[in-house]
Amino acid sequence: MSMKDRFQGKDYLTLMDWKPEEIKYILDVSADFKRQRMMKQRHENLAGRTIAMVFEKNSTRTRFSFQAAIAHLGMQSFYSTPQTMQLARGEPIKDTARILDRYCDGLVIRTFGQDVVEEYAAYMDSPVINALTDLTHPCQGLADMLTMREHKGKLKGLKVAYVGDPWNVCQSLMVGSSLMGMDMYVALPKGWAPNEKITKFANEHAADNGTQMVITDDIEEAFAGADVVYANTFHSMGHKDIEERKKAFAKYQVNDETLAMADKHAIFMHCLPGYRGEEMTDSVIEGPQSAVFDQGENRMHTEKAVLALFIQ
Ligand code: CP
Ligand code: NVA
């Protein structure tokens, strides 16, 4: 089967489902879109298609980048929240999924549990695309890797240092790093850890590739010589223990001093939204090493590639 046919009609629920060469291909298609190649054959058949977007959590980047990508590809999106759908009065997901499937050629969904996106996928023939769950953020993972590749010219051999909530974004980055041959160091206070299943997957793939996947409470160990310093909020959407987290994570801030521990050519990345004065300082996000707005832009290019490849 040719590479481009491997994705058609499939779900995009986690990076764990894809091989390194398939991820590389999605990134290549994203880069093509970014260079504004029209690739008519890939998306002429998408004109007039419809994409449902159901978002149970707030979003700026994911919502608008998908809606822009959908419009650029000649498709139309319908955005809704579960609160304004009959889901709110208890209509089961399995009924909602089968109805949406009769109207739409794909579903982009942001929710809490990974089991929710899996249930939609089980009841829909059309592709289901994960726009963030508590477990993973695979669309962010693609944009992150495209940004690293653009700024550093490669993925293999890079050292990525991460601070922030060890959740969806971190976990997709752990999966992506372990598959694509990057070393990843996650700096966390003692007592905090990423999901066990993700950690096992990342450890096994890092071992196969001879790369590092390290969880450490030592920010110096994590940042030393890093090519990419990645920050994320200490308190993701849905967490109630915000003050406890801010206190526990406070010393894992990317500021001028900690950024200087990394390679002098390191880039600073953040999935955003970010909190100046918590996980990063204003000087870092606004500084010369910051790649965060390229990274935000790349959400649109990678999502366009996912739509063009997966939607039939
Ligand atoms: N990075 C990201 O997913 O941002 P939004 O929450 O604004 O979509
Ligand atoms: N970890 C963050 C990412 C937001 C894009 C959250 O879940 O809130």
Image (tube, helix red, strand yellow):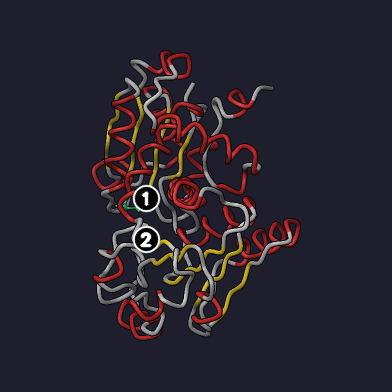
Contact between marks 2 and 1 (CB within 8 A): the answer is yes
Residue 37 horizontal/vertical position (percent): 40, 23
Place residue 233 in its image quadrant.
bottom left
Place residue 210 in its image quadrant.
bottom right
Q: Which of 172 and 254 is in front in this view?
A: 254
Q: Residue under circle 1?
A: 295
Q: Residue under circle 2?
A: 270
CB of mark 1 near ligand 1 (< 8 Å) = no
Q: Is residue 192 visible?
A: yes
Residue 110 horizontal/vertical position (percent): 38, 48
Q: Residue at x 29, y 26 (%)?
A: 71
CB of mark 2 near ligand 1 (< 8 Å) = no
The kind of residue on which mark 2 rests is His
Q: Residues within 10 Å of mark 2 (few under 14, many from 20)?
A: many
Q: Which residue is drawn at 41% across and 76% down?
A: 260
Helix, strand, or loop for circle 1?
helix
The kind of residue on which mark 1 rests is Gln
